[in-house]
Image (cartoon, grey):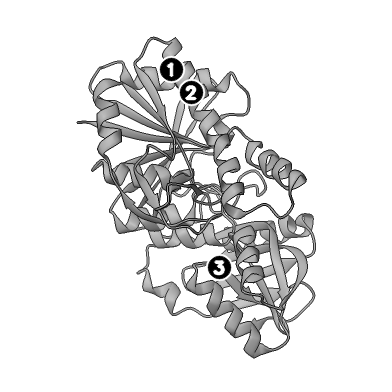
Amino acid sequence: MNVAVLKFGGSSFQRPEDYGRVARHLAERLADGQIKIVAVVSAMSGTTDKLRSVMLDVNDQARPSNLDAALATGEMLSACLLEAAVSRLGFAVMSCNGYSLGIRTDSDFGRASVESADPGHLIAALQDNDVVVAAGGQGVDHSGRITFLGRNSSDLTAIVIASMLGEHVCEIYSDVPGIYTADPNLVAGARLIPEIAYGTAAKMSRHGAKVLHHRAVDYAEQHAVTIACKSLMNDGTVMAGTFVTDQGDASTVTLARDSALLSCRSLEERKRLRDFLDQREINAVCTDGTGLCILCDIDFALRLLAVVGDRSLFVGSRSAVTELGCTTLRVHLEENFEAAIARARQIHERMYPDSNTKPLCPSAPMHCATHSSLLIHTNNAPENRQ
C-alpha cells in the first residue's frame, strides 16, 4: 500500500476555514488515485493553552492523567474538523485518536514516551478510506488511559506512523517551509537550510527552534525516516524547504523565549539535578554561580522536580539564545525577549556577514559537536566554561 504521511501543525489551523484549505490539498494529492493519505493534525492554534488554563482554573492541582486527557481533546477536535472538511469533498475518510492509533506509551503523563506501535488498526482503516486523519501528540498507556506526548509532539506521532507503515518519508507542514539558520520572523537574512542531519536538527530543537520536535527527530533517525519540511500557502501552493536526513550541517542561532532558571544551593546539587534531568532527556545548561536553566519540556521538568521533592529554587523565566556552530555551542541568557532578539541578530550577522554569498558551514562529522566545549554566557557576566 502506497501511503503518504503528512503532518499539519497548529499554525496550519488559525481559522475554521483553514481545514477546507488543507482538505483541498489532500484532494489534489489523491487526484491520481495512486496513494492513500494519513494526515496527522495538531490542535487549532492556541487551543492547548486554553484547555490547560481552563483545567487549572477548575483545579490547579489536577492530576497529570486528568490534564493529559483534557489536553488531548484539542487534537481530537482538530481531527474531527479535518475529517468533516475532507468528507465534504466526497472522499472516504475517518479520524482516529490515541485510543485507536495503536501507539502504546509509558505512563509519564505530560510527556509520555512511545514504547510500541501496532499498525493493524491504521492499515484496516486505510483499506476502507482514502484518508485517515490522526489526532497528534497522544497514545494510551498499559491501563488504557490517554497519554500526552508533550507540547508540539504531533511531529512525533507522524514519524511513528510513517515508521509503523513502512514509509521512509514523512512530510511536516508548518508556517515556514523548513529549518533556517535563525527564526526568519525575527532575524533578517536568516537562510533556509536545504539539508540537515538528524543530530543537528534535534540539538536545535532542544535549544528553542520550533520547526520540529526533538523527540520526533530522534525517532526518525532511529527508524530511518526522512523528514521533509514544507509549508502550505494560503493559495494552496506548497513550498518545500528542508530535508532532515543523516547528513548536512549549518551554523545556527535559536531562541527559547521562556526558559526556566533554577537556583541551586551548591555546585554538587546542580550537578545532581542536571544529571537527573539529563537521564529523562530534558535539556538543561549551567549558568553563572549555581544556576541551572531548563530549555525544553519545562512544565514536565518542573513537575518531575516537584514530585521528587527537590528543594532547588525556581527563580523565574529567561530568554535563551543559543549559537550552534560546527564546533561550538554557546547559550546566552537575557532578561527579556527583546534583548534576546537583539542578541540573536547580532550573532547571526557575525555568522553570516553577507547572507547572499556566505556559504553554509560545510558538512562535518556528527561527532564534532560531542567534542566541542559548552560555553554558557549570561547577560552582563563573563563566560563560564563548563
Check the image and report above or below for 259 versus 16. below
Where residue 82 is drawn, which disc sits there? 2
Residue appearing at x 70%, y 44% in the figure: 55
Q: Position of residue 3 (x, y in %)?
A: 27, 32
Q: In the picture, which quadrant includes the C terminus?
A: bottom right
Q: Residues within 10 Å of mark 2 (few under 14, many from 20)?
A: many
Residue appearing at x 52%, y 59% in the figure: 204
Q: CA distance from mark 3 to mark 1?
A: 39 Å
Q: CA distance from mark 3 to mark 2?
A: 34 Å
Are circles 1 and 2 on residues that touch, CB within 8 Å?
yes
Where residue 283 is drawn, which disc sits there? 3
Where residue 171 is drawn, which disc sits there? none
In terms of secondary structure, where does tag 3 sit?
A: loop
Q: Position of residue 69 (x, y in %)?
A: 56, 43
Q: Residues within 10 Å of mark 1 (few under 14, many from 20)?
A: many
Q: Position of residue 316 (x, y in %)?
A: 77, 66
Q: Position of residue 296 (x, y in %)?
A: 59, 61
In terms of secondary structure, where does tag 2 sit?
A: helix
Are circles 3 and 1 on residues that touch, CB within 8 Å?
no
At label 2, the amino acid type is Leu
Q: Residues within 10 Å of mark 3 (few under 14, many from 20)?
A: some
Check the image and report above or below for 328 versus 72. below
Q: Which residue is mark 1?
A: 86
Choose between 191 and 376: the one closer to the eye.
376
